[in-house]
């Protein structure tokens, strides 16, 4: 395959990308007319924007498409979401196949929207570990078109749930890639601190990554992030550690945050912000003014701390909407985080590409470089700026040099003379 006249994300000019045996053989400036070395097919992109595939760093595939069963979350809070899910586990008896089918439907939505790499949390506060068994099979079944990482996520607590710590360890032995935790949901602050330490210890013991649901609450006193960062720093595994949500940071005072940022930089941990999910879930206990409940994305990025965006949910007890489209998460996130300056806009797609890859610790094999796998997506636009403004279709998703998804953009016919 050769992709002719590609506008590479973040670069000037247009380029020809030669693909041979599933890998990127050569990237030449379009003006270079040498013969080239590639497999049969040529596609002239006429300056369309080419990027590495989108990365979804945070979704709950075992929860997708369950909203309303057995009941809807009326308050829109995180806590009622957990309550609905806990009730569902008791009354809706799903088979492994049911869970797999829901997860596959969500993965299909994600694939259509240009995603080829997904990190999913899987609830392991369930003595049968059914969700994990289902997702371990899904991971294997989809690997030709989607890379999946599984987080062993103790939704109802490592200590608040009976034998949560043992289930967590069992999940790691069964093959989960990442250790999770939810310190703000434990019964006491001390249990929360202990749960973070436990998660990091287990990660160290089994050679796994860490991704903590951290301070997903509008409580300015919820300060488990400093524990995550300090423990990661002391163990020297910061780059393998991620703090997701951290919405309490939107409520911290500036003096504390100043001190915190020094530790965050030192620790090298990653952040996942989930703007659509948390705009919906947070601020629910406020009257007016009503908080946005989002972490300090702009300030973290300005401090060279890695931040990426995720969707979190597709129709689950926590969030009633969602269709797997990360471009829309970026659009909402830029607004919610006051990141609508020119430079914020033209670099915004970092939030769902390279920054996500770094969080998943797969940056070494990610990106459009000679020698890498021929994995890319093509957007129906000619610039980074227009990609954000117009939310164009993903025309192609290409994996190992094969077109695995092709989309024809909608066509509008104007019957008004001046426009036709
Ligand atoms: N579980 C949780 O603790 N927080 C969330 N935002 C979701 C599930 C979706
Ligand atoms: Fe989450």
Image (cartoon, rainbow, N blue to C red):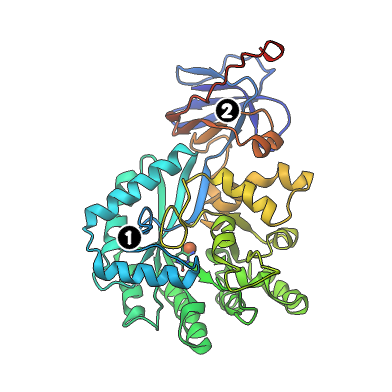
Q: Up-down: is 295 above or below 331?
A: below
Q: Secondary structure at mark 1?
A: loop
Residue under numbered circle 2: 26
Circle nearer the viewer, 2 or 1: 1
How would you rate the neighbour count of disc 1 (Cα within 10 Å): few for under 14, some for 14-19, many for 20 or more? some
Q: 142 or 363, which lies in front? A: 142
How would you rate the neighbour count of disc 2 (Cα within 10 Å): few for under 14, some for 14-19, many for 20 or more? some
Q: In terms of sequence position, does the residue under pointer 2 or pointer 1 come before the other?
A: 2
Q: Residue 339's spot in the image, x, y percent?
A: 73, 52
Residue beneath the point at 47% across and 28% down: 407
Q: 163 or 75, which lies in front? A: 75
Residue beneath the point at 69% across and 34% down: 386
Q: Quadrant of the C terminus?
A: top right
Labels 2 and 1 touching (C-beta < 8 A): no
Q: Residue 233's spot in the image, x, y percent?
A: 60, 75
Residue under numbered circle 1: 69
Q: Residue 341's spot in the image, x, y percent?
A: 78, 48
Q: Secondary structure at mark 2?
A: strand
Residue beneath the point at 62% across and 16% down: 414
Position of 315 with respect to 129 (left or right) is: right
Residue beneath the point at 44% across and 71% down: 80
Q: In which image quadrant can residue 73 be found?
A: bottom left
Position of 249 with respect to 161 (left or right) is: right
Q: Residue 132's spot in the image, x, y percent?
A: 31, 62
Q: Up-down: is 398 above or below 166?
A: above
């Amino acid at each position: 395959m050769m992709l002719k006249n590609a506008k590479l994300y973040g670069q000037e000019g247009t380029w020809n990308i030669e693909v041979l045996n599933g890998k990127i053989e050569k990237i030449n400036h379009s003006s270079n007319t040498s013969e080239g070395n590639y497999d049969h097919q040529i596609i002239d992109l006429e300056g369309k924007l080419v990027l590495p595939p989108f990365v979804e760093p945070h979704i709950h595939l075992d929860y997708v498409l369950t909203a309303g069963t057995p009941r809807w979350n009326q308050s829109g809070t995180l806590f009622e979401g957990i309550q609905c899910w806990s009730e569902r586990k008791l009354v809706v008896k799903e088979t492994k196949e049911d869970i797999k089918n829901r997860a596959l439907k969500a993965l299909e939505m994600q694939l259509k929207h240009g995603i080829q790499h997904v990190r999913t949390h899987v609830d392991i506060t369930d003595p049968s570990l059914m969700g994990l068994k289902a997702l371990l099979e899904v991971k294997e079944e989809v690997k030709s078109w989607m890379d999946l990482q599984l987080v062993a996520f103790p939704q109802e607590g490592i200590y608040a749930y009976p034998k949560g710590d043992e289930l967590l360890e069992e999940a790691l032995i069964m093959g989960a890639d990442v250790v999770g935790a939810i310190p703000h949901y434990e019964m006491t602050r001390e249990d929360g601190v202990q749960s973070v330490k436990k998660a990091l210890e287990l990660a160290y013991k089994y050679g796994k990554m860490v991704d903590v649901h951290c301070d997903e609450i509008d409580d300015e006193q919820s300060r488990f992030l400093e524990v995550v960062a300090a423990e990661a720093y002391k163990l020297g595994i910061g780059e393998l550690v991620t703090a997701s949500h951290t919405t309490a940071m939107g409520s911290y005072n500036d003096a504390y945050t100043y001190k915190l940022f020094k530790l965050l930089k030192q620790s090298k941990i990653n952040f996942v912000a989930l703007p659509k999910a948390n705009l919906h879930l947070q601020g629910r206990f406020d009257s007016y003014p009503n908080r946005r409940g989002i972490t300090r994305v702009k300030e973290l990025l300005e401090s060279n701390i890695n931040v990426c965006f995720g969707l979190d949910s597709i129709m689950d007890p926590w969030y009633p909407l969602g269709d797997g489209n990360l471009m829309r998460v970026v659009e909402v996130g830029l607004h919610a985080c006051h990141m609508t300056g020119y430079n914020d806009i033209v670099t915004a797609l970092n939030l769902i590409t390279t920054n996500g890859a770094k969080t998943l610790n797969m940056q070494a094999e990610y990106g459009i470089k000679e020698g890498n796998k021929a994995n890319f997506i093509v957007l129906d636009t000619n610039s980074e700026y227009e990609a954000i403004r117009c939310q164009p279709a993903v025309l192609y998703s290409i994996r190992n040099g094969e077109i695995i998804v092709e989309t024809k953009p909608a066509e509008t016919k104007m019957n008004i003379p001046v426009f036709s």
